[in-house]
Amino acid sequence: MSSNNHLNREVLTTLQEVMDDQFPVLINTFLTDSEERIRHIQKALAARDSDTVRRQAHSFKGSCNNIGAECLASLCEKMEAAGRAGELEGVEQQLVEIQQEFSKLKGTLKSFAG
Amino acid sequence: MSDDTPLTILVADDSDTDRHILETIVARDGHRVLSARDGREAVSVFEEEQPDLVLLDALMPNLDGFGAARRIKALAGESLVPIIFLTSLTDTESLVQCLDAGGDDFLSKPYNRVILQAKIKSFNRMRAMHSTILDQRDQISRHHEHLLQEQTVAKQVFDNIAHSGCLDSNNVKYFLSSLAMFNGDILVAGMRPSGSMMVLLGDFTGHGLPAAVGAIPLASTFYGMVNKGFAVSDILREINHKLKTILPVGIFCCATMVDINFRRQQIRVWNGGLPPGYIRRASGGEPEPITSTHLPLGVLSNQRFKDDMQLYDLAWGDSLYLWSDGIHEARNADGDMFGEDRLKAVFVEDADNSTLFDRILGRVQAFVGEGRRDDDLSLVELRMDRPENVNAVAAEAERRSRSTLSEWTMSFDVLPGSFRHFDPMPLLLTILVEVPGLRQHSGDLYTLLAELYSNALEHGILQLDSDLKSSAEGFTQYYELRQQRLSAISEGLIRIHLQHSTTDEGGILRLRVEDSGPGFAGGARAPALSNDSHAYCGRGLALVEKLCDAVHYLGDGNEVEAVFSWSSDA
């Protein structure tokens, strides 16, 4: 997985233009939002609630796509597929990957939001 | 409404990030933004604010996008509220689910501003078009409603006029569409005071209002004149004149008019432009056609209009059948017309007249077929029957006996004080013309009364000798004497006795004038009738004899009775 895929600069630049002064707010919203999603996924995994895993992963994937976080989006997509299949075996490992990817992204985005 | 009119747009998404992006894009383009965090909130915001467009995330807590879309479409009713699903779902099944729920389009993540703007514009155009269509549809339905309302009013007015007649008589069967007047068909029937029945079946050219306008003057003229006892020719001429005057060129009325005289067992028929009617004898056999020999009503000026009629003797139970061309032109599913031959075939079948009407109608309707039933059928059967069996005849006699003078007598005494100045003629004439049949004879009646009265006054009361009037000098002397005696008179009496009774044909009026003079016995001589046209005297009574059926001298010659009989069959 190349480091280029962590963040699609083109998407982010466009977003910056569109959001203008709202851009830093959006980045913060995304970060808070994402931490919330990760907590929800943790809880659902503990409860072996595959449907909630699927939904949360799906929504998380959408937001990631909007921000240009393509790598995180594809991790979410794998988890969504597992949730849909009702196969939660090994999903804990996926969650760890998501958490690692997110913390990397967090640093980069914060520098963007200035 | 142009395609960049600012809209109110609802954004429903549970992800704060995604919602924030959309809100910003939409607001930057000048639209008003409403937000919702889940499906339930989306529905309640929609209910409150009625946004023009909805951007809806598919997966949301509480109520998902599919459920929200269904409720929103239901709430929107017939107004177009486009729903764009925001989704990163890509499988066909999910997309179909969005469409099934009422979604109109998709927007996938990451959001593309240009694409979203294009979609909003395009839906805005669609909304504008939709609302134009709705407005026009409403306008059309209002127009249509208005038109129906007007037709209902027109039909009521028309029915009030048309149904004042005797279409319900037991010798008449008819079939007319309920909106016949708008097909141009009209059927009226009325009784003349003489007890004959007049029926007119008409078919105006065209359809709709132009075909209907002529029906009202036709019906009101028909009933007005039939009730007053006018002759068929007068009624036809008057209707022709009215229609010719009122209607534009090219609109006229094909019509058949029938006068049924039950007593004489005769019908007289005038056919101008309608298909031949048939006479079917109760004894059976081939139908006898009554073909058109005239131009329709409303075509010719009254000078060129022909009112001659065909006369037929009918036996009891013989029937006349009339129709408009709707029967001939009734088409089946293949477009074939019913036609004259099929119609004639029904007549030739060996069955009696009592079922013929229903058989004709049944045959035409079966030919045309269910569901395509033409509204243009007009069919009439008129049966010759004994007058005592026809309830319209009895009703007319009853109406006449209640509302008009028929059997009556009156005595009217003129006393000396009135001899000099009073002229009883206008008063008596006013009473006599109350008898409908006598109205047209008022001139003759005036002459009769005036002659009898002046005879009674001058010869009976004043004892003037009519011989005096045989010379010019005598004539002057006669009038001097008359003046002298009139001013001197102080006693005497002239009694005018009127007696009227009705007959089958019309009526008889007896006028008796009696004076208190001595009569022949007292020296006056019976008025000799002179054939000498130069004689000044005797003109009066000769005229009286001419106008009357009989003149009787009663008593001592101081009483004269004139018998005047009248017939209502003009």
Image (tube, helix red, strand yellow):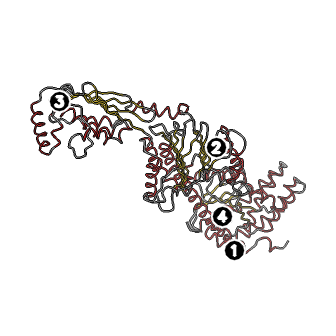
Q: CA distance from mark 4 to mark 1?
A: 16 Å
Q: CA distance from mark 2 to mark 1?
A: 99 Å
Q: CA distance from mark 3 to mark 4?
A: 123 Å
Above or below B477: residue B389: above
* Any part of residue A12 in sight: yes
B561 and A34: which is toward the camera: B561
Residue type of the residue flagged with mark 4: Leu
Relative side of A74 to B369, left or right: right
Residue type of the residue flagged with mark 1: Thr
Task: Please determine if labels 4 and 1 lie on a single subunit.
Answer: no
Do residues under tags 2 and 3 come within 8 Å of each other at their CB atoms? no
Q: Secondary structure at mark 1?
A: helix
Tell me which chain the residue with mark 3 is part of: B
* Any part of residue B76 in sight: no
Task: Please determine if labels 3 and 4 lie on a single subunit.
Answer: yes
Q: Of the residues under marks 2 and 3, which one precedes in the sequence?
A: 2
Q: Secondary structure at mark 2?
A: strand
Circle 2 is placed at which residue position? Answer: B280
Circle 3 is placed at which residue position? Answer: B461
Q: Secondary structure at mark 3?
A: helix
Q: Of the residues under marks 4 and 2, which one precedes in the sequence?
A: 4
Circle 1 is placed at which residue position? Answer: A13
Circle 4 is placed at which residue position? Answer: B22
- 4 or 1: mark nearer the eye: 4
Q: Secondary structure at mark 4?
A: helix
Above or below A108: residue B361: above
